[in-house]
Amino acid sequence: MELGRPCSKISEAAAEILLRYHWPGNVRELRNVIRRAILLASGVIEPEHLAVLPVDPPPTTVETALRGESVPVGSSLREIAGGAAACAEQQAIRRALQVTSGNKSEAARLLRTDYKTLHVKMKQYGIPAAQFRDFGESRP
């Protein structure tokens, strides 16, 4: 109603995508994704209207270990440490983008790295800056 669009349904496939996404941001991120999907959809929100969300791959051995679950036998310390570093990098990038509302230049400054390095890491981890932007939301 807020956007003046006739969208009252979310398809089962789109709902599954929303449920699978781990939502590193907050309720504002969800709200922005839904608003964007409503603007793109004509009646029913489908998976293609949620293209801004990356599809998360199944958890790696390292992510499993970081959650306190047992690591499969045969994982080397180097594999675990490398995976933990990558996981920490992803979280830091997502948090910096959240704080800067998707502004990559500001996020790079916060992370004390150059813009190009941040851009490469975002591409490597499949982190789109657009998912952190406020779509049409006025700031207080």
Image (cartoon, rainbow, N blue to C red):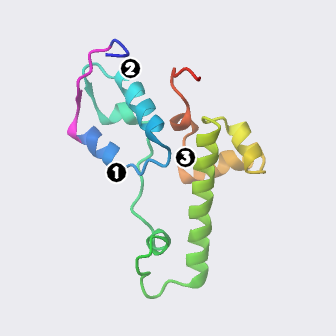
Q: Earlier in the sequence, mark 1 or mark 2?
A: 1
Q: Amino acid at mark 3?
A: Ile
The location of residue 93, given as percent across then percent down, is: 62, 50
Q: As drawn, is 90 to the left or to the right of 64?
A: right
Give the mark toward the camera: 3 or 1: 1
- The spot of residue 44 in percent (x, y) is 24, 26
| Residue displayed at 61% across by 36% down | 102
The answer to whether 12 appears left or right of 94 in the picture is left
Q: Is residue 10 magenta?
A: yes
Percent coordinates x, y for residue 110 in the rendering: 74, 46
Q: What is the secondary structure assignment of the residue under circle 3?
A: loop
Magenta extent: 5-12
Q: Under tag 2, what secondary structure? A: helix
Tag 1 or tag 3, which sits nearer the N-term?
1
Identify residue for label 2. Answer: 39
Q: Is residue 79 above or below residue 9?
A: below
* Residue drawn at 42 percent across, 53 percent down: 56
Rendering quarter of residue 88? bottom right
Q: 99 or 127: nearer the eye?
A: 99
Q: Is residue 85 above or below residue 137?
A: below
Q: How packed is label 1: few (under 14 Cα within 10 Å), some, or many (20 or more)? A: few
Q: Is residue 22 left or right of residue 133?
A: left
Q: Identify the residue under disc 1.
A: 20
Residue that label 3 marks = 127
